[in-house]
Each structure stands twice: as C-alpha cells, then as structure tokens.
Amino acid sequence: MSRVEDRIRGTGPKKILSLDGGGIRGMMTVEVLAALEDRLRKALGRGSDFVLADYFDFVAGTSTGAIIATCVALGIPTSDIRDFYVTSGEAMFDKAFVLKRLRYKYEDEKLAGKLRQILGKDPAGKDIALGSDRLRAVLMMVMRNATTDSPWPLSNNPWAKYNDRTRSDCNLDLPLWQLVRASTAAPVYFPPEVVTMGTHEFIFVDGGITTYNNPAFQAFLMATLEPYRMNWPTGEDKLLVVSVGTGTSPQANENLDPSDMNLLYNAGSIPSALMFAALNEQDLLCRAFGKCLVGDALDREIGDLIGAKGPVSPRLFTYLRYNAELTPQGLAALGLSDIKPENVQKLDSVKYIADLQRIGQAVVQKKVNLDHFAGFLKG
C-alpha cells in the first residue's frame, strides 16, 4: 500500500489542512503553519524531523495555497517553505516584457523554474508527478479549466475516477510543478498554463477565480462524498478541518455615486467582489456544518457562529479558521497599527513580505490555541 493509500484507509481521526489563494500574501499562511508545526511537534513529543505531513492526512490549496499545500504534502519543512517565499518572491512576480503587458502583468518562466526546483525530481531524473509516492499525504489543488469552463479540483487520491492508472489520460502522470503553476495562473498577472492530458489539451487558469479560492468545504466534500471514494467518516471527534486564509480587505465605499459604476469600475471591482463572496461562503458552510472553535466574525448579522446552532447536530467535523482583516481596524486589533493596509492588500506586495510575516505571526499569537486540537493530538 502506498503512503497516500495508507493515509486514506488508515484508522483513527482524520485531519484536513486547507489553504486559501492570495498571491504573495501566502507569506502570512506560511508563518501560521510554521507556528503550528512547532507547537504540534512539542505537543506530540516528536523530534526535529517532524513536519506537517506527519500530522495532516489531507492538504488542499488554491493558487498560492496550492504551492504551499504541495510543499507540505511532500514533507518539506515550513522553514524551507518560508525561505522559498522570502528569496523567490520577486522572481515569482517578475515583470513581463512591455509588449506583453496588455495580455498579462508578469512573466511565468521564473515561477515555473522555481517550482520545478523546490518540488524536485524522481530517481530517474523526471519531474515529480501527481501520483508520486514522494507525496506523504492526500493533496488537492484547485484550478479553472478555461477550455471546459469549469472548476477542477485535482487530487492524488488513487481511487478517484480520473486517477485510474489504466486510463491514457490518468491525472496521476501529470507533472506536479505544472499543476501548481496552473493553479497559480492568475488572469492579468500570469499567462495561462496549457496541460496535455492523454489526447486532450486544456488551458488552465488560477483556481482563485472559481468558488474555491478558499477550498475548505470542497476538501471536506472530497473526503466524504461517495463518488470521490475516500469515504471518510464524519463527526466532531472523527474529522478536523483547519483552514488558513491570506487576509481579507473589504473596502468601504461611502462616497460611491451610482454614476461612478461604469464599465471600467465594474470590470475592476466585480471579480474581486465575487471572489470575496465565494471565500466567505466556503467559510460559512464550514461553520454551519462543522463545529467552529475559532474564526473572525463573518458579518455583523451572524457573527462568528462559534457555539451557534446549525442545520445538523452533532456537527460533521471540528473546524478552525485562521485569518486576518487587512484594514486599519483589523490590523489595529492585531497590534499592528504601524502597518499601512495598502502595503499588504495587493497580491503582489513583494516589497512588504516582512510586514506580511508580522501579520501571520500576530494571527498565531492572537488566535492559535492547541486546546482547539483536543482529541486530535494522539501521536
């Protein structure tokens, strides 16, 4: 039995880690994960070689979250993931040639090269594939197939329909770096990624423009719905979902006039508004069907739903959500009033990586409590 098969079919409570998209703001996620890795190592009495793949059975990610999720599933220590983001941030957002800027803002060659470097090769010198036994946990990445006009959550689950080794278009044979690159191909920022699957050629773009920029509830569904064939049992004591965001930045528009909402305004604001709504919907679904122990208020009407009654009882899983609001009020609540919101709200704020790290570290101090992991801390 392979490592992934063992993680899927193994007994005991299951743990899912879900990572949002958000460009270089994934630096916040890395800091949260670094603290989790350290605290879990100590709580479980493990040695210095302990990594998050030793704890989480299933890691899901979209866009920048797909980069981090893949690294985690491969057993790469968070210190190395941090180094990758700090040293490669500018390379990942390399300015495109002037003549290409009407099509996209950044070149992708350096990002692709960096991904191939950190994800590694197999003993035969080939790029690591999605079905590689180097992956120590179930991995799901979300991308959008522009060719079929549909969201594609791809995984290395060996029992998934399109992971059948007898198929000529088996997804498990696809290079891992290319799938990560496809999930991070944000329109306007990067060119799309063309992936050949058997006799088919598909054009992929960033999974962040699907409803799964926050892939937490989709990961839960993949783990439990019969067609995916993982069939994990549900229950507050049987399944843990830990979801880490890259910050939200809701904008107040008190001075907005209806006449301002022209074609250019809508073209610039509607995509981000839809992504923000979809992200919150995934979070809301997790809190409605899971037992939420930590998470910021979703809105002023329903609050954070911690302790609130939901549509099912008992809940289907235990849910933890770590995120930050990148507004003056949100940063002040984290004790970071000196950070300017406009410096950390953009997906390509590579000049302010240090500030993003401070935000992630502040989220840890304010919100991460290992008591919330009670029942899921057996070695």
Image (cartoon, helix red, strand yellow):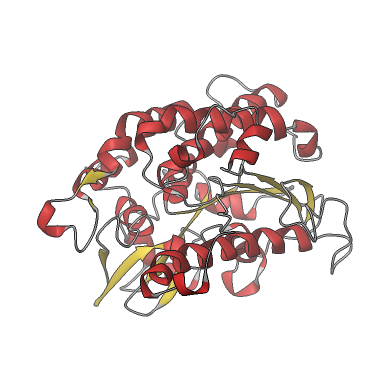
> Residue 264 in the image: x percent, y percent?
36, 70
The relative height of residue 85 versus residue 184 in the rendered view (above or below) is above
Outermost residue, bottom direction? 148
Q: Residue at x 32, y 29 (%)?
A: 87
Q: How many marks?
A: 0
Q: Locate residue 127 relative to residue 41 in the image: left or right.
A: left
Where, by quadrant of the figure, is residue 262 drawn? Answer: bottom left
Q: Residue at x 29, y 42 (%)?
A: 92
> Residue 310 in the image: x percent, y percent?
85, 64
Near-viewer residue (211 or 334): 334
> Residue 164 in the image: x percent, y percent?
43, 69
Q: Quadrant of the C terminus?
A: top right
The relative height of residue 42 versus residue 82 in the rendered view (above or below) is above
Where, by quadrant of the figure, is residue 199 drawn? Answer: bottom left
Near-viewer residue (309 or 49): 309
Q: Is residue 51 visible?
A: no
Q: Residue at x 38, y 58 (%)?
A: 183
Q: Is residue 350 visible?
A: yes
